[in-house]
Image (cartoon, rainbow, N blue to C red):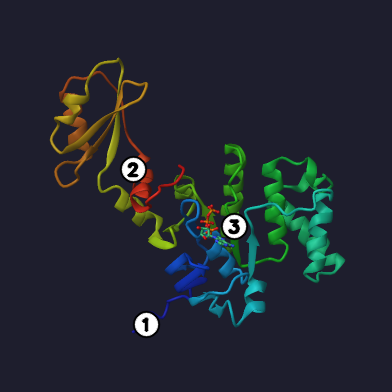
């Protein structure tokens, strides 16, 4: 019997395939995105991310399979789907000689909003994207991070329930990236669902509740971010750092359950992975202390996430 609390997914992709001539860009792709979640869509170059996004946005038609957005079909219900979504492409197509206000006003008018509504909505989206003070700035003179926020503000003018962002963080410096992520979290708190593509899994790990990993048109994983982390942690890895330089690799390698002890370049440190069937973190730490090594720190190595990603995708991705 169906669960009475079952909710319709915001995005439901079933057996989706798409080819460009003889090149298979998407092969039997399946995944779902739940309401009010932040879902990462991650894969190396050419994995099929943009093609999938374009199909969801109704810019390309599925050749096989189906895609539903809020329960509506992207082929049969184009207008209704477009009303509920906002797509931010990976390239800038901005009218750079306009001010921020003129640019947003232009799109507001294109959506059929009258001037009073436009003034109100533009004030709201500028506040949301932390751009209040930039209303009269020329787009041309803004930093890449600020231009990206204008692009996001433009998507928000239509008040979409589902935001589709193609590589929004690419080309941003770390600070602009963090600020963008904070804005996305705020939008999620407001009830929006956010689908965000990236090459960078580690960046999305903190942000997203769920993730789909795609490689050469094939889905390699789709589900909770936690599930991926648990899978990734099948061989937990810890970094053992000593207070002085010495050759401790062999001693660490000899501890029970240790699979590998790899020297970290340039530091008196080793990345130690163990088999969770044979030992655990506390036993490993006790073993390190029993060796009498001058221990400076012992910390979990988050690189296992990247390793899982490399294992899932043939080419790996930038991390
Ligand atoms: N218009 C097109 N004509 C022919 N092949 C295309 C076309 N668009 C995309 N492809 C090919 O389809 C595959 C998937 O491309 P897509 O742009 O969806 O990947 P992506 O994951 O978004 O990559 P990137 O991260 O590099 O943007 C790639 O091999 C690409 O070369």
10 Å crowding of disc 2: few (<14), some (14-19), many (20+): many
**What is the crowding at mark 1: few (fewer than 14 residues within 10 Å), some, or many (at least 20)?**
few
- Per the image, label 1 sits on a secondary structure element best described as loop
Judged from the image, the secondary structure of the residue bearing numbered disc 2 is helix
Residue at the far bottom in the pictured view? 1
Can residue 107 be seen at all in this image of the molecule?
A: yes
Q: Of helix, strand and loop, which one carries label 3? A: strand
Q: Tell me whether the residue at label 1 lies in contact with that at label 2, contact meaning CB atoms closer than 8 angstroms.
A: no
Please state, as top left, top right, bottom left or bottom right, where the C terminus lies in the image. top left
Q: Which residue is mark 1?
A: 2
**Which residue lies most toward the front here?**
22
129 to 77, vertically: above or below: above
Using the image, tell me which numbered label, if any, was put on residue 85. Answer: none
Q: Position of residue 75 (x, y in %)?
A: 59, 79
Up/down of 44 relative to 299, above or below: below
Q: Which residue is mark 3?
A: 165
The residue that label 2 is drawn on is 304
Indicate the quadrant containing the N terminus: top left, top right, bottom left or bottom right: bottom left
170 lies left or right of 156:
left
Name the residue at 59% across, 66% down: 54
Give me the residue at 57% from left, 48% from top: 181
Residue placed most toward the observer, 299 or 172: 172
Residue closest to the eye, 121 or 168:
168
Report x, y in % for residue 288.
20, 27
Question: Which comes before the other along the chain, label 1 or label 2?
Answer: 1
* Among the two numbered marks 3 and 1 on one chain, the one whose residue lies closer to the N terminus: 1
Task: Name the image quarter holding residue 108.
Answer: bottom right
Determine the CA span between mark 1 and mark 2.
37 Å
Q: Earlier in the sequence, mark 2 or mark 3?
A: 3
Question: Where does the image place residue 107, in percent across and percent down from the top left?
Answer: 78, 63
| Residue at the (58%, 46%) spot, across then down | 170
């Amino acid at each position: 019997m169906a669960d009475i609390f079952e909710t319709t997914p915001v995005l439901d992709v079933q057996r989706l395939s798409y080819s460009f001539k003889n090149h298979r860009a998407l092969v039997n792709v399946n995944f779902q995105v739940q309401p009010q979640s932040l879902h990462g869509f991650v894969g190396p170059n050419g994995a099929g991310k943009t093609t999938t996004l374009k199909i969801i946005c109704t810019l390309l038609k599925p050749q096989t399979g189906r895609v539903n957005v809020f329960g509506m079909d992207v082929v049969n219900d184009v207008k209704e789907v477009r009303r509920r979504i906002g797509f931010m492409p990976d390239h800038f197509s901005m009218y750079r000689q306009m001010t921020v206000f003129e640019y947003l006003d232009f799109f507001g008018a294109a959506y059929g909003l009258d001037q009073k509504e436009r003034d109100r909505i533009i004030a709201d989206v500028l506040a949301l994207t932390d751009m209040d003070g930039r209303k009269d700035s020329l787009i041309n003179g803004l930093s890449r991070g600020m231009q990206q926020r204008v692009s996001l503000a433009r998507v928000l003018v239509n008040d979409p329930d589902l935001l589709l962002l193609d590589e929004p963080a690419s080309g941003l410096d770390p600070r602009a990236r963090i600020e963008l992520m904070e804005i996305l979290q705020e939008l999620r708190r407001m009830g929006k669902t956010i689908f965000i593509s990236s090459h960078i899994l580690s960046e999305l790990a903190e942000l997203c509740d769920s993730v789909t990993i795609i490689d050469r048109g094939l889905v390699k994983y789709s589900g909770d971010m936690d599930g991926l982390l648990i899978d990734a942690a099948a061989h937990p890895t810890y970094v053992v750092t000593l207070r002085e330089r010495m050759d401790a690799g062999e001693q660490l390698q000899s501890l029970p359950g240790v699979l590998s002890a790899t020297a970290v370049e340039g530091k008196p440190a080793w990345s130690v992975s163990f088999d969770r069937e044979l030992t655990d973190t506390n036993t490993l730490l006790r073993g390190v202390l029993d060796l009498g090594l001058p221990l400076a720190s012992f910390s979990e190595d988050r690189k296992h996430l990247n390793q899982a990603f490399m294992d899932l995708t043939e080419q790996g991705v930038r991390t």
